Image (tube, rainbow, N blue to C red):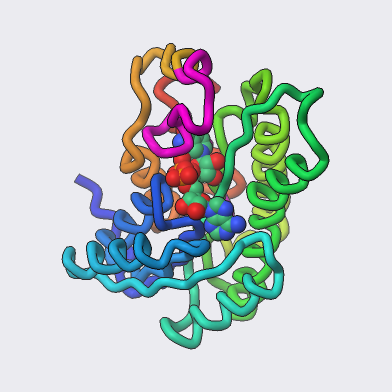
Amino acid sequence: MIKLDLSGQIACVTGSATGIGRACAMALAAAGAKVALNHFGQPALSLQLEQAIREQGGSAFSFDADVTDAAAVEQMFEQIETTMGPLNILVNNAGILLQKPFLQTTEEEWDRVIATDLKSVFLCSRAALSRMVPRAAGCVINVASELAYLGRDEFGVYCAAKAGVIGLTKSLAREFAPAIRINAVAPGPTDTAMLSLDQISAEWQEKELAIPAARAAHPNEIASTVVFLASDHARFFYGQTLSPNGGALML
Ligand SMILES: NC(=O)c1ccc[n+]([C@@H]2O[C@H](COP(=O)([O-])OP(=O)(O)OC[C@H]3O[C@@H](n4cnc5c(N)ncnc54)[C@H](O)[C@@H]3O)[C@@H](O)[C@H]2O)c1
């Protein structure tokens, strides 16, 4: 079995209090990385995660910041490096979903989804890369979505934001290669709050699961791809979007 070893590395996962971000933080820590846990006003959940990581022998610290706020993002990366040391790995995971018929979508909703799902990747990548470039080392992994490729009626803003993430991934991968590797994952349906009936209709939940795998992914099944991309085993991957999607999309 290939051992993915990230010992000595410092990683930051945005939106890590829940779901895929939480699984990424646990998996990066299990591979030996010290993990900066970004959350947005979820201190109790983040503290629980810190404790879970420490119980498995790892190290983690929580940082509360809204990743759509440039000043808060800059301050967070400053604090991460002061508290933990030079950042090696950034996972841009924070995101929100919006199911809304296009003609009912307001400008405020458009701005909120684009800010959370796309602008946050700009802000956090800028803050991280400005620190990684002088050290000529680092790695960024962006969490996109299979819906960026598929498109989906009533999910137009989300699909636009995630397609933007993939475009940004490719451009930044070219701009910062070879020292810094930038890649993305485009998960298929994954068993988190985002796939719950609070967020999408029963009709779409059913359609999301009508895929060859006939189930949603466990968040760990996305996290393992993220850990791979962060590891030296992925050293020839630049600007790629890997899509663990249960066969929903075959590229
Ligand atoms: N669940 C799926 O089926 C699925 C599929 C494809 C892609 N994704 C993507 O995976 C990522 C994680 O989603 P998830 O499924 O784990 O859902 P989730 O709702 O559990 O996780 C999203 C996290 O982002 C955080 N967040 C939201 N706005 C933020 C902000 N302004 N600042 C900081 N953190 C913020 C939330 O607090 C939450 O912890 C998202 O980017 C999502 O678009 C999810």
The N terminus appears in which quarter of the rendering?
Answer: top left
Picture quadrant of residue 161:
top right
Is residue 124 located in the magenta-colored stretch of the structure? no
Q: Is residue 191 magenta?
A: yes
Q: Residue pushed farthest bottom?
A: 82
Please count the marks in the image. Answer: 0
The location of residue 159, given as percent across then percent down, is 67, 32
Q: Is residue 108 visible?
A: yes
> What residue do we see at 60% from left, 28% from top?
147
| Picture quadrant of residue 162 | top right
Out of 124 and 140, give the one closest to the viewer: 124
Residue 143 placement, left or right of 176: left
Compare residues 250 and 69 and report the one nearer the observer: 69
**Residue 181 seen anywhere in this rendered image of the structure:** no
Question: Residue at horizontal 54%, vertical 71%?
Answer: 137
Residue 92 spot, x, y in % from top left: 55, 55
Horizontal and vertical percent position of residue 146: 55, 29
Residue 30: image location, x then y, percent: 25, 60
Quadrant containing the C terminus in the rendered view: top right
| Residue for point 63% across, 70% down | 73
Q: Residues in magenta?
A: 182-205
